[in-house]
């Protein structure tokens, strides 16, 4: 499905898309969070890109691990430890590999979801990034099992993630800063679920 | 003495809590890890790690956090400090810091310092 060079390209696209959407993500965070999600994610991914030349010839596991460590160090908000743990666990799932197939990609996504759950101690339905991640991974798994191409199962994943983002508008936040606004969080989409969808779209953008 | 680290998104808040707890106990090793490197709001892995190391001794270190990423980032720092005696305390930040500082200064163990901070949550204010 991909080699380490393509993983580097994907991460660069992630950083570009996060940068383009930084204000949008921060605006989403304003009414229900602390108004910093886009700024934080952008700062984190800029540092990741800055450090890519040092790891671009490493295996995929090492590239993902470094990405996670940079996010933990530089994001500054909850998305730092959450996405940081997700990338580090994902890296551990494919440690030493220079090429991965669709099954490895599923391992990466499962490890990422596990990492976010471990760190955030949240479950599906609490208005968090998991509400986009979990359905996306389920859709990708179905696609892989059905023998679909990466372009097809990634498109399925993006579609499920977007539906997950829509779902977050309908529920009350019980985890994270948004839980302080309680019922007033209804009607607002979750910034973390939105940024995850953008990251998945970044991967999908390199497959057609 | 058990070291104490105060972690907050806000540099001023973390420093203020240390300042206040120092009025109660001037002697214990206590330090603030608030905000990002540039002074902005957020939690910094490096600042928390450096703060823990700066007050570390064989007696150990307790960390008191405000909320959200303060807790998650601290948790990651501690996970990567394998073998070191460092623990997070689930307690109100101001009251917990004051109680922990007083307990640490009296030469108590890490467990006793931790318990004093947890017990502070149960104290009525009026």
Image (tube, rainbow, N blue to C red):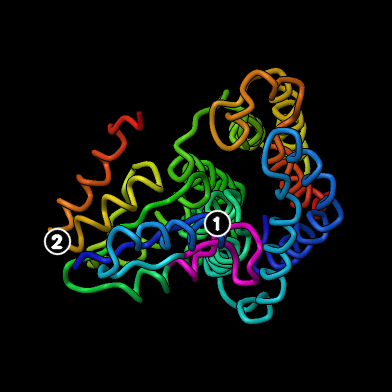
Measuring from the top left, give residue A77's x and y in whole percent: 60, 52
Residue A138 visible (yes or no): no
Residue A13 lies left or right of residue A60; in this view the side is right
Residue A182 lies left or right of residue A26; in this view the side is left
Q: Main secondary structure of the magenta part?
A: loop
Chain of the residue under the numbered disc 2 shown in the image: B
Find residue A194 and report its image quarter: top right
Q: Residue at x 53, y 53 (%)?
A: A81
**Of helix, strand and loop, which one carries label 1?**
helix
Find residue B32 and report its image quarter: bottom left
Task: Name the quarter where the N terminus of chain B is drawn.
Answer: bottom left
**Of helix, strand and loop, which one carries label 2?**
loop
Q: Which residues are magenta?
A: B33-48
Task: Name the residue carrying label 1.
Answer: A84
Chain of the residue under the numbered disc 1 shown in the image: A
What label sits on residue B106 in the rendered view?
2
Measuring from the top left, give residue A185's x and y in whole percent: 69, 24
């Amino acid at each position: 499905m991909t080699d380490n060079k393509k993983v580097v390209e994907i991460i660069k696209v992630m950083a570009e898309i996060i940068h383009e959407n930084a204000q949008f993500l921060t605006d989403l965070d304003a009414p229900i969070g602390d108004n910093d999600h886009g700024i934080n994610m952008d700062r984190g991914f800029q540092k990741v890109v800055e450090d890519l030349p040092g790891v671009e010839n490493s295996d995929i596991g090492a590239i993902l691990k470094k990405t996670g460590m940079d996010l933990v160090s530089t994001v500054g908000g909850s998305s730092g430890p959450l996405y940081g743990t997700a990338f580090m666990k994902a890296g551990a799932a494919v440690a030493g590999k220079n090429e991965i197939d669709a099954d490895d990609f599923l391992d990466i996504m499962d490890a990422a979801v596990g990492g976010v759950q471990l760190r955030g101690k949240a479950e599906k339905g609490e208005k968090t990034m998991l509400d986009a991640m979990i359905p996306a991974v389920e859709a990708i798994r179905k696609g892989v099992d059905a023998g679909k191409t990466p372009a097809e199962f990634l498109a399925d994943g993006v579609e499920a993630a977007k539906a997950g983002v829509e779902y977050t508008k309908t529920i009350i936040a019980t985890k994270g800063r948004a839980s302080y606004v309680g019922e007033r969080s209804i009607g607002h989409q979750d910034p973390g679920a939105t940024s995850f969808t953008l990251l998945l779209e970044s991967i999908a953008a390199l497959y057609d | 003495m058990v070291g104490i680290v105060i972690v907050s998104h806000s540099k001023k808040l973390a420093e203020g809590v240390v300042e206040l707890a120092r009025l109660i106990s001037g002697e214990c090793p206590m330090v603030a890890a608030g905000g990002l490197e540039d002074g902005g709001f957020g939690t910094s892995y490096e600042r928390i790690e450096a703060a823990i190391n700066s007050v570390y001794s064989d007696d150990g270190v307790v960390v008191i956090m405000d909320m959200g990423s303060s807790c998650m980032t601290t948790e990651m720092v501690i996970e990567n400090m394998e073998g070191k005696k460092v623990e997070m305390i689930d307690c109100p930040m101001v009251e917990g810091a004051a109680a922990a500082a007083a307990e640490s200064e009296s030469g108590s163990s890490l467990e006793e310092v931790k318990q004093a901070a947890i017990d502070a949550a149960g104290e009525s204010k009026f």
